[in-house]
Amino acid sequence: MSTDSNNPDRFHSLKIELFLKTTGGELEIFGEKLVKGLDPKKGEEDPLIIPKDAHWWELYHPKIPSWEKNAVLYPPIDSRKVLTAPSIMEVLKLNKHVSDEQEARNTLSVQILDRIEKLTRMTFLTLESAWAQQNMRLIDFKIEFGFTADGELLVADVIDNDSWRLRTKNWTELSKESFRQGENLSEVEKKYGTVSQMVNNFRIPNQALVFWGYSVGDSLPYVNYVYPEKIKEIGIDMIDVALSVHKSPAKALAKLEEILQAYPDGGVIIVKVGRSNGLGPILAARTSWPVIACPASLKDFPEDVWSSLRMPFQVPLLTAWPDENAILAAFNILSQKNPAMYTQIQDEIEELDD
């Protein structure tokens, strides 16, 4: 998102910049000084990385716009020297991912950059949604990456009110940026206290995705089309129900009340039935949860769709087809309260731009 509070724009996809971490404006690897001459007292410590291709980086002055002639600091450096270390190479060899060391360096330097961008994207999207639940705007953030002794790439940084620019719905700054702009220290302190209290409200809700069909197991398989084995870890329980509202209306409505009571964080019901869809309309009229009908017999009996479309007043049944669109619609709805679900969906949407 642009940082001009008078004319804000939302980018469709996240904009990611990479900076090379140095110590005192210098970086030495394997006895070779790859970066030197920056003055940390002037904020020149960590140069901007712009990849020329898969293995070579140009380094740009962190305080000079990249389009200016004197922005380029040095001739391109070999990223394989920066991104590969003995511990990482040993892990690769032990796991038999590659046998040749040069091949390992060529492959790994690309994989690490891809992994850094992916971790950055997923971390930001999760925090963006968590703040949105509290009517706040996460503008941007910075994080650092490092390797464990076993060569695993991790976010190696504290993420706090010094790491991001955070604003209210009305674009009032709450992060360290207010201090940088010279705001009164007592006001800055209040803002930090507010942010600290709000962070305690971060959570992944426990929601329900209910598949209601004519027999147990008929609806569950198509969830695997979207996020196999990821549903539970992002706070969503899948519930399979087989009860006919035509034949057992009392039991069906009692089951609905049981589910509603068990999930105060809410959920979505997907109804998959053939012939006359009485189940979807009745459920939609008796709950504030979204109910999505996915007609099961359209191929052989296309006229069956009307029992899912022509609804009377105050029966807000939604209809989606085919199965995968119904499940994606349900996830979109759940993501409005679920940062983990939002992250999965938004990441896939942004990847379409690539």
Image (cartoon, grey):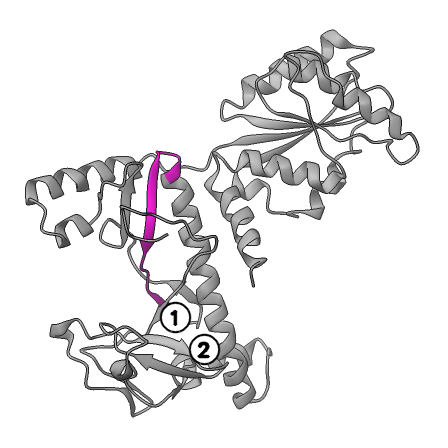
x and y, in percent, of residue 78 in the image: 41, 87
Quadrant of the rendered image containing residue 64: bottom left
Up-down: is 321 above or below 178? above
Quadrant of the rendered image containing residue 221: top right
Task: Name the amino acid, label 2.
Answer: Ile
**For mark 1, what is the residue?**
147
Quadrant of the rendered image containing residue 77: bottom left
x and y, in percent, of residue 327 in the image: 67, 38
Look at 89% across and 36% down and name the residue there: 299
Disc 2 and disc 1 in contact, CB within 8 angstroms: yes
Question: Callout 2: few (<14), some (14-19), or many (20+) C-alpha neighbours within 10 Å?
Answer: many
**For mark 2, what is the residue?**
88
Name the residue furthest bottom: 31
The boundaries of the magenta stretch are 132-148
| SS category of the residue bearing label 2 | helix
Q: Nearer the viewer, residue 37 or 22?
A: 37
Look at the image and tell me in which quarter the C terminus lies: bottom right
Name the residue furthest front: 7
Look at 79% across and 10% down and name the residue there: 248
Judged left or right of residue 83, residue 198 is left
Residue 144: in magenta span: yes
Q: For the residues marked 2 and 1, what is the alpha-carbon distance in whole angstroms?
A: 8 Å
Judged left or right of residue 180, residue 199 is right
Task: Name the amino acid, label 1.
Answer: Phe
Q: Nearer the viewer, residue 247 or 315?
A: 315
Question: Callout 1: few (<14), some (14-19), or many (20+) C-alpha neighbours within 10 Å?
Answer: some
x and y, in percent, of residue 21 in the image: 29, 73
Up-down: is 277 above or below 295? above
